[in-house]
Amino acid sequence: MAGCYYSALLARAAHLFGKNTAESVAAASALTPDNSRYLARLADWKPDQRVQLLHRAVELNPFDSESWIQLGLAAELDGNDPQTAERYYLRAAAVDRMFLPKWTLTNFYFRRQNQAEFFRWAKATLAITPYSPDPVFAQMWLMSQDAALIGAAVPERPRTLLQYAIFLSSQQRFAAIPAVVTRLVHAAGPEKAHALGRDDLLASIQDRLLSAGDSEAALGVWTSMKNGGWIQESVPSAAHPLTNGDFSTPFYGHGFDWIRANAAGVEVDQFPGTEGVRVAFAGEQAEQCVLLRQYILVEPGREYRMTWKATGDQMGRPSGLTWHVQSAGARNSAEIASGDVLADSEGVWEFKAPGVGRLCLLTLEYRRLPGTVLARGSLNLQAVSIVER
């Protein structure tokens, strides 16, 4: 009978607690006065007795980390007693090794502007957080503008490093990205390249860096990916600006590799093992369109020599196909253009790099010439190279 009575009492208390009103929680706590959880909830409904109820809760259950945190908040925000608050927060972290106490201490030391302790607990929070780490990253950059100091607080967790690289890209803190990507590819290894966003997330970062004209950060990311075995393409230099000029590697489609056209009426195919590209025209394409493009690194004002092998199938002459080079970092910069790509089976073009910035955009373009019809047929392109003279 006693067991049945006690079970009924607990069930009644649980029912009242679940209603979560001031009266019901108080009634549930009166039925089971030794339930620390009920006392902690009652503290929310009785602000004038909050501290006493929370102290009673932690006396009953010293492992109640949330009540320790609430005591800390009361001491810090209501009592203006940061020393006592710190002691309560640290007690919560001692009895609970999970996320909330660590994040609470991170915020506490941020408010106190205690840089050393802030970064200690920020690192601990990032090592265990099940949530988006962006709020932690944002706080770290508010605490300090030292990229190396902040980077040291980001743990060697591949997923966290990737999230940090994405955060830096979104905040346009481009200079800090290469070091993070270097750590990412080292921590993950080449076998996890695809799973960790090489073809979408990191590719988007690469594209954003290049669109912004930040050639140094983009090159740093590209070099780290190459050294870590995440990509096969070579690392461009001012002496040899072009990547994958023999078309032997499948297009990555981002960064310093070829990006194929997305133009109606044009198909760009790369056939494995043939070391070449076929561009087919249906005769329905726009009068002017880009077929292939690639970002290249040059020395401004230097002389370069570009060569290629090309044949045309059912293509008229002149074909309207030309190479173009334009500075990627300057608005309204003049572009330079080659002669007709199909003028000879082995083409040569000597040009001077634009005088503004290292980053240029190389494009293969079709432009219908006056007095000609839209091209039909295909271009077969091989062995493209650019070298400094």
Image (spheres, grey):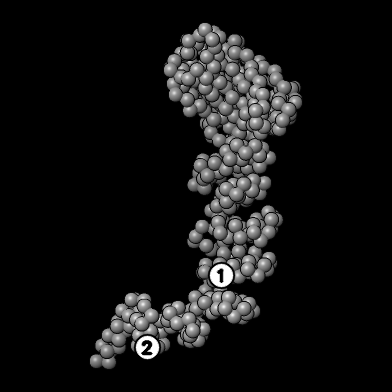
Residue 91 visible in the current orientation: no
Quadrant of the rendered image containing residue 300: top right
To which residue does mark 1 refer?
A: 104
Q: Amino acid at mark 2?
A: Ala
Q: Residues within 10 Å of mark 2 (few under 14, many from 20)?
A: some
Who comes first in sequence, dot 2 or dot 1? 2
Name the residue rendered at 62%, 31% in the picture: 295
96 and 115: which is toward the camera: 115
State the image quarter where residue 29 is shown: bottom left
Judge by depth and name the residue closer to the eye, 378 or 193: 378
Q: Amino acid at mark 1?
A: Thr
**In the image, farthest residue toward the bottom:** 2
Image quadrant in which the C terminus is located: top right
Give the crowd class for mark 1: few <14, some 14-19, many >=20 residues within 10 Å.
Answer: many
Q: Residue at 55% across / 76% down in the picture?
A: 73
Spot occupied by residue 154 in the image (x, y as percentages of width and height): 61, 58
* 30 left or right of 365 in image: left
Q: What residue lies at 53% left-to-right and 33% top-to-bottom?
A: 253
Label of residue 30 in the image = 2
Instruction: Residue at 57%, 64% (x, y): give it.
Output: 125
